[in-house]
């Protein structure tokens, strides 16, 4: 088969642009063959590009040469069609296509390139094998679903840029090759050829650089930044990802909240969804008490304190620790579980934190009728709702702190709440088809109102701010208190005197924004005083010499008039994933890695030549 050149042809319209009002126009359209239907003297080619699909008709009686070309065309061939637009007969109008009222009667057809038989067709609605999709990503990205995802991504990024620029933020790029600093995950290292034995690190975030920009008087900075973390992967995590990063001087916490709410509202509006502001706020302790998790999904009912339903004798008989929380979780419309269903749910419960659960309230009712009735009353809901009680197991005492300041949760209490919260999430996922709560979000994501106006996202997308996180968490391996965020987070001023004497009670000026059970972003008011920064390092057992070795350039910068400052970073990929209704970050990242951090399309990572290694003064060792 002889291929044609494009020559002087220029596209007049995209494949998704033509309508009934264009009937009679002479047009040139170009794209890929999505489907081919051969009816002898008539051949129909559905031509596809990023914008849509148009039907092209090749009539042998009107042009034998063009018809002969169409006989050779196959799926994914690149085609140029020249002809006139005509209205379809009323009986063959396709209401599912934007261009369904018209077709192009071609008098000239050029085959600009052929194609091998693809491993899957971009015309398919779903391809089950994700590894095949990732290997042939360039084919996968032709699919309308994927094209839509990247349109969403583009609109979101553009809306964020425009909003922050309008708020006086400068977009400033920070380095990709920097020094290794502890950020909570392993660094990706880049060996230096010029400085043998030394390494750059790819940034896990622009954290220190954006703080230095505040020292530099830039006042308001933002960046849609690439970040790199060598950590275990999952559906909402990739080794390289993109975050909306910002920092500002002299802010109150609420100042940052209003900026974030502003650009998120604009991002949602850009894809046709109204997101109400301001977002609700709760403290970390309130989040754990009410939801058992620091990224609560407000679409689901929260936890209910039901300890008051039980007498001391009840708790003893049930082997429930009376010093720990007793809570009920409720999943609507699940109905009564069978014995097999209850057995199947056991692996979903984390027994390692000293908790136990009761999921058969009918059986509980036989021995403790008054307590069970009170539990049902406190938890509320309907008769067909699933109720599960989670409490501390009196027979299991985990190693955790009981000490706490007035009104603050202890580690052991948090262990029970978090166990209940994780079980709540797992059961909600398992019984999603029964309760139908998540379908509210799917309905808005797929709502036609997004194309014609603003769909109401108030129930489908439930953002929340979580504040006042613990400043430290105890590391069982090192037996030390370590920063729960990063060591540049400011503690609450009124908690400063307990940094060494009672680190468990110290609250950080650290905050998260979560939505529908996903953490969208986290940030904090930073430490701007050198004396406070030194005190934090000492409180975690870091000597002045070690601090200088790790962060010397930053600590020196703090000595030159550092203003109070704070900021936040939100995951762009996660925001787009939610708005696209995608199940994984891989659906909204153009060239993602697998769960084993492999790029199947380019086959990376791979070994490199001995010559390259010698230039870098590196000798690899094989694992035993």
Image (cartoon, grey):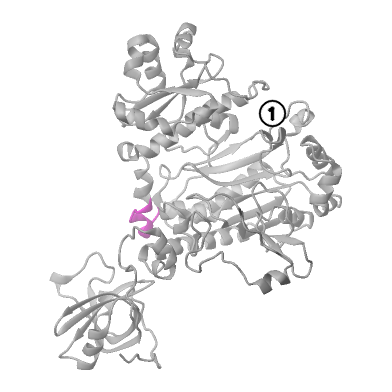
Q: Which residue is at the far top?
A: 313
Of residues 316 and 218, which is closer to you in this image? 316
- Asked if residue 594 is among those painted magenta in the image, a careful observer would answer no
* Image x and y of residue 104, in percent: 25, 81
Name the quarter where the N terminus is drawn.
Answer: bottom left
User: Horizontal placement of 545 versus 322: left or right?
Assistant: right
Give the residue pinned by disc 1: 504
- The stretch in magenta equals 445-454
In the displayed structure, 99 sits above or below 105; it is above
Residue, x 42% and y 38% (percent of image)? 299
In the displayed structure, 588 sits above or below 376; it is below
* Image x and y of residue 245, in percent: 63, 55
Q: Which quadrant of the structure image shows residue 140?
A: bottom left
Q: Which quadrant of the structure image shows residue 605?
A: bottom right
Q: How many marks are shown on the rendered structure? A: 1
Residue 379 visible to an observer of this rendering: yes
- Asked if residue 452 is among those painted magenta in the image, a careful observer would answer yes
Secondary structure under badge 1?
helix
In the displayed structure, 377 sits above or below 348; it is above
Of residues 441 and 254, which is closer to you in this image? 441
User: Horizontal placement of 423 versus 167: left or right?
Assistant: left
Of residues 391 and 97, which is closer to you in this image? 391
Q: Residues within 10 Å of mark 1 (few under 14, many from 20)?
A: many
Of residues 154 and 255, which is closer to you in this image? 154
* Image x and y of residue 437, in percent: 36, 39
Residue, x 51% and y 63% (percent of image)? 599
* Image x and y of residue 389, in percent: 43, 22
Residue 336 visible to an observer of this rendering: no
């Amino acid at each position: 088969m002889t291929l044609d050149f494009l020559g002087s042809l220029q596209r007049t319209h995209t494949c998704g642009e033509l309508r009934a009002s264009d009937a009679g126009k002479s047009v040139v359209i170009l794209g890929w063959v999505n489907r081919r239907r051969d009816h002898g003297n008539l051949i129909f080619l559905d031509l596809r590009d990023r914008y849509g699909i148009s039907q092209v008709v090749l009539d042998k009686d009107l042009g034998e040469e063009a018809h002969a070309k169409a006989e050779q065309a196959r799926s994914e061939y690149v085609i140029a069609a020249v002809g006139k637009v005509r209205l379809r007969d009323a009986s063959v109008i396709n209401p599912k296509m934007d261009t369904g009222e018209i077709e192009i009667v071609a008098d000239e057809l050029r085959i600009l390139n052929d194609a091998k038989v693809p491993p899957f067709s971009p015309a398919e609605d779903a391809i089950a094998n994700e590894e095949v999709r990732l290997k042939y990503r360039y084919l996968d990205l032709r699919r309308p679903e994927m094209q839509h995802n990247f349109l969403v991504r583009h609109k979101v990024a553009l809306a964020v840029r425009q909003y922050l620029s309008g708020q006086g933020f400068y977009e400033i790029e920070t380095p990709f090759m920097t020094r290794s600093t502890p950020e909570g995950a392993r660094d990706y290292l880049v060996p230096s050829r010029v400085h043998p034995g030394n390494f750059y690190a790819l940034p896990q975030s622009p954290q220190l650089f954006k703080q230095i920009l505040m020292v530099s008087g830039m006042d308001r900075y933002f960046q849609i930044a690439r970040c790199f973390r060598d950590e275990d992967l999952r559906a909402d995590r990739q080794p390289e990802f993109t975050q909306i990063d910002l920092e500002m001087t002299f802010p109150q916490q609420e100042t940052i909240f209003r900026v974030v709410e502003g650009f998120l509202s604009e991002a949602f509006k850009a894809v046709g969804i109204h997101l109400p502001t301001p977002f609700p706020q709760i403290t970390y302790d309130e989040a754990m008490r009410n939801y058992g998790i620091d990224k609560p999904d407000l679409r689901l009912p929260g936890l209910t304190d039901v300890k008051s339903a039980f007498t001391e004798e009840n708790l003893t008989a049930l082997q429930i620790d009376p010093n720990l929380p007793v809570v009920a979780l409720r999943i609507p419309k699940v109905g009564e579980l069978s014995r097999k269903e209850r057995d199947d749910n056991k692996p979903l419960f984390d027994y390692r934190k000293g908790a136990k659960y009761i999921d058969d309230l009918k059986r509980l009712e036989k021995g403790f009728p008054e307590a069970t009735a009170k539990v049902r009353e406190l938890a509320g809901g309907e008769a067909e709702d699933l109720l599960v009680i989670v409490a501390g197991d009196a027979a299991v005492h985990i190693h955790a702190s009981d000490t706490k300041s007035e009104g603050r949760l202890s580690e052991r209490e948090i262990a029970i709440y978090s166990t209940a919260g994780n079980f709540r999430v797992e059961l909600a996922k398992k019984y999603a088809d029964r309760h139908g709560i998540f379908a509210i979000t799917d309905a808005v994501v797929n709502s036609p109102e997004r194309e014609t106006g603003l769909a109401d996202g108030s129930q489908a997308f439930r953002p929340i701010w979580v504040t006042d996180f613990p400043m430290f968490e105890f590391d069982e391996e090192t037996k030390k208190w370590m920063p729960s965020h990063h060591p540049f987070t400011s503690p609450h001023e009124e908690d400063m005197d307990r940094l060494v004497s009672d680190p468990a009670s110290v609250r950080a000026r650290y905050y998260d924004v979560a939505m529908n059970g996903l953490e969208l972003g986290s940030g904090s008011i930073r430490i701007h005083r050198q004396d406070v920064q030194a005190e934090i390092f000492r409180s975690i057992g870091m000597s002045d010499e070690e601090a200088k070795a790790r962060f010397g350039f930053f600590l020196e910068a703090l000595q030159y008039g550092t203003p109070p400052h704070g900021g936040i970073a939100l995951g762009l990929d996660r925001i787009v994933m939610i708005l696209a209704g995608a199940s994984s970050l891989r659906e909204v990242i153009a060239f993602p890695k697998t769960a084993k951090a492999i790029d199947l399309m380019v086959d990376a990572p791979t070994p490199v030549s001995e010559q390259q290694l010698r230039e870098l003064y590196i000798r690899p060792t094989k694992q035993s």
